[in-house]
Image (cartoon, rainbow, N blue to C red):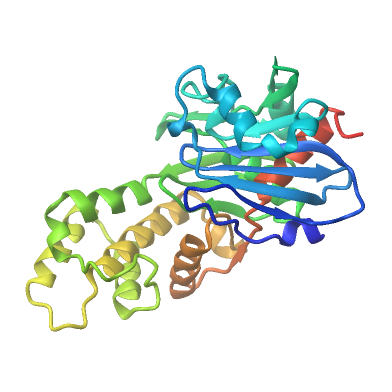
Amino acid sequence: MLGWLLGDVGMNGKYQQASRALDQRACMIAVDWGTTSFRAAKVSADGTVLDILAAARGISTVQAGAFEGTFRLVLSNWERELDTLPIYLCGMAGSRQGWVEARYVDCPAEFGDIADAVVRLTAGGMNLRFIPGLHRFDATTGHDVMRGEETQVIGAQALGCERIVVTPGTHSKWILARDRSVADFRTFMTGDMFAALKGHTILKHSMDANESRSSSDTPSFEEGVRRGFRSTGIAADAFAVRARSLFDDGAFHAESYLSGLLIGNEYAAGRERYPDAWRHGLTLIGSHTLTACYERAAEYLGVDTQVADLNASIRGCFELAKFNGEIQ
């Protein structure tokens, strides 16, 4: 559908809006409110995105007690809809640091379990619905949590993606979802580790200021992926970035290699936990830059991938509203 073909909306510290002049009426508002970003959409009864708005107003920029005011400010052009339509919010808005805490639902969880656990709040005339995150525990790996990705998975399944879902980012998730449920998931601090190693360790002296992490088309990235995939000691392999850069002949790109090393190591751990992923392939959900890196790494390792629409979280909000009987 046309709505799901809307591309990334740039943020750059300002409000950015993309509209589609369609002869349809909005029946809900879907909001993905994360730590650093805000994304909202008006959605029609058949799931078409009619209007979409993004802003660099993540919850980390909002002072305690200021969520309602910030929300209305960002969506000031939608004042009429804010007071009449159900508003579903996923992501960190429902965290302990957010607007209202929506407690975690234990895995395995059917999509209906998630819909039933939505926290309802009426604030300033707005009918708000905060989507809960998910919690998993097993004796081998202990506790794990996610918030926001569960809604992306619901949306991805509604759009026909039935594979294991991988959401690259600061905290990358591998999510086993099937038959309208989330059976299991695992978190990898790949993005956090990359940023920390690159900027706050001895490795920072090996980084090229002109190089971008997205340089996944370099031989160094491929080499890093293959090394990380077979690594038995990622801490030792990470220091090798420093040692090698001291004897660099100009062909070695340390940042690309480090990125590939960590992504390759994540793939190895993901394969160990979900061996079927290698047979059935992966669905990637994330920014174009990150999914491109993960696609390239998967290509090197012989894994099939498909990229889901970045608006999967919006579709997930729509599906939960529909499940709760709020789509008119």
The picture places residue 112, in percent across and down from the top left corner, at 75, 30
The picture places residue 316, in percent across and down from the top left corner, at 71, 42
- Is residue 149 visible from the viewing direction of this image? yes
User: Left or right: where does residue 73 sit relative to residue 246?
Assistant: right
Q: Is residue 66 above or below residue 75?
A: above
In this orientation, which residue lies closer to the viewer: 163 or 1? 1
Q: Residue furthest left?
A: 246
Q: Is residue 213 above or below residue 53?
A: below
Task: Identify the image quadrant of residue 285.
Answer: bottom right
The picture places residue 202, in percent across and down from the top left corner, at 11, 55
Q: Quadrant of the C terminus?
A: top right
Task: Identify the image quadrant of residue 71.
Answer: top right
Q: Residue at x 18, y 48 (%)?
A: 200
Q: Is residue 15 above or below residue 117?
A: below
User: Left or right: where does residue 59 sit relative to residue 276?
Assistant: left
User: Left or right: where does residue 324 sit relative to residue 211?
Assistant: right
The picture places residue 288, in percent across and down from the top left corner, at 53, 63
- Is residue 183 visible from the viewing direction of this image? no
Task: Identify the image quadrant of residue 177.
Answer: top right
**Count of numbered circles in the view:** 0
Q: Is residue 130 above or below residue 197?
A: above
Q: Quadrant of the N terminus?
A: bottom right
Q: Residue at x 73, y 46 (%)?
A: 315
